[in-house]
Image (cartoon, grey):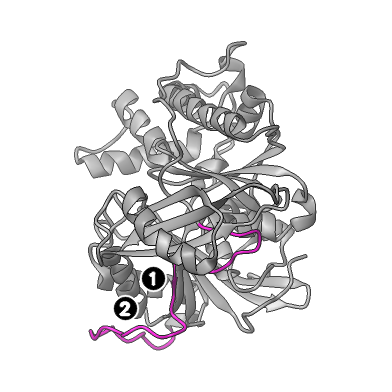
Amino acid sequence: MARARKATGPVVGLDVGTTLMKVAEVRPSKEGVQINAVGVAPTPEGVIDESGYIQDPQALGQAVRQLLTQAGISTRQVITSVPGQSALVVRVIEMPKMSPSELDKSMAWEVERHIPFAAQGDVVTDYAVIERPDADPNDPNMEVLLAAAQQDVVDAIVKTLFAAQLDPVAVDVQVLATARTVIGLQPGKYQGKTVVLLNIGATATDMGVFTDGVLRLPRTIPIAGNHFTQAIVDSLAYRVEGTDPRERFAHAEKLKRECAAVLLERLGPSGAAPTYGTDFGAPTGLIDFSQPSATSGMVDFSAGYEEPTFDVEEEQPGSSQEQPTEPATPAPVEAQETDPLRIEVFDAIAPVLGDFLAEVRRSLEFYRGRVQGARVDEIVLCGGTARMKNLDRFLAQELGIPVSVADPLTHQEALVRRYSMPYLQEVAPLMTVAIGLAIRDMID
């Protein structure tokens, strides 16, 4: 069981995506950590663009505050992450071994080499030497994990937190937050094992390969939940109601949640539909820095941060007692595999499913080619699309690797009183990042 370390009181983890906002309040306990509250709500339309940039911090802050109130969360200390992929870049860099002071000087050049946007005063960077237990002490090189985010993106995040009347502790990145939840809270289960974490978001899938809790390979797969939804819009036009594109997409999203399933008997012996994945090069995109027990984030606010001045609407008396409407994300309907609508939906999403499988397979092949004697013991699915029926069975069948769906609200002590257990089980795969952010300073 994970041990409490620095945090002595409750902390809120806030995971804001382009589609959903997720929050978790966690406190240290004698047994490890205790999850006191969770919440999920739609991200207000138009406040975040597809790249993850927050367009309207004040409106988003108001929405976050409302979500916290609905979830019964009054804690102000918050740790959040950078939304989107294009605003954040992470690289695993191989460098000659050097002293910390030499590394500080060298990283100034590495930042300019490895990030695609201007580095002169416009980015926030952090890095850490990756110390692997199995590393050869005579190896003249070392690995460094570099994370960089655009300064205006971080500023918008901070403004959002202040608008929600929260006290920012750090802005972190998502793959390590996921690993803290899945691996860090169950260290005995994954000791000596290599685990692949697939956090399937709305616009992209965050992938991380971890051995003994240490990041081996970060990767962003450009296929995620919205691609399945768009396939339903394109293929089932006569079933998708509405004339406005946003209305049609929302209706297709509802169809996906209620009917999407991997119908294994329709795949045949050759597996999924034809695949059209792109070539896989060096790992790029959204991910984190980490040492075996690294918990520090990209931005630490212990030294303070100047709070912007703008008005925040006062909370109405008694609002903290309001019960949230359950569920925010409806559970899939258990339709029969012979249901014609379910078959139609599957046929619509099958090509995307094939593309997703191809990207995961390419990433695993790249990892095996990069790391001598590499193996993968398990794949863990997180995010909303992880709840698609039979997706875990399909990936296990096609990849020959055990696949499970993350359930941090079952294997960890959770005293969430505002929601029923069926609802908590339904939203559990969505909560891995939010919980991992909250426990950043609580576990080893």
- Helix, strand or loop under label 1: helix
Where in the figure is residue 216, as x and y percent of width and height? 59, 45
Q: Which residue is mark 2?
A: 163
Residue 194 lies in what quarter of the image?
top right
- In this picture, which residue range is highlighted in magenta? 289-318
> Is the residue 331 above or below the residue 163 in the image?
above
Q: Quarter of the image for the C terminus: give it.
A: bottom right
Quadrant that contains the N terminus: bottom right
Residue under numbered circle 1:
64
The earlier-in-sequence mark between 2 and 1 is 1
Q: Quadrant of residue 442?
A: bottom right
Q: Position of residue 350 (x, y in %)?
A: 46, 23
Give amino acid for label 1.
Val
Front one among 89 and 230? 89
- Binning the other alpha carbons within 10 Å of mark 2 as few (below 14), some (14 to 19) or many (20 upward) gives many
Locate residue 193, reporting x and y percent.
74, 44
Q: Which residue does the image show at 47% across and 64% down from the upper left?
A: 102
SS of the residue at dot 2? Answer: helix
**For residue 140, above or below residue 340:** below
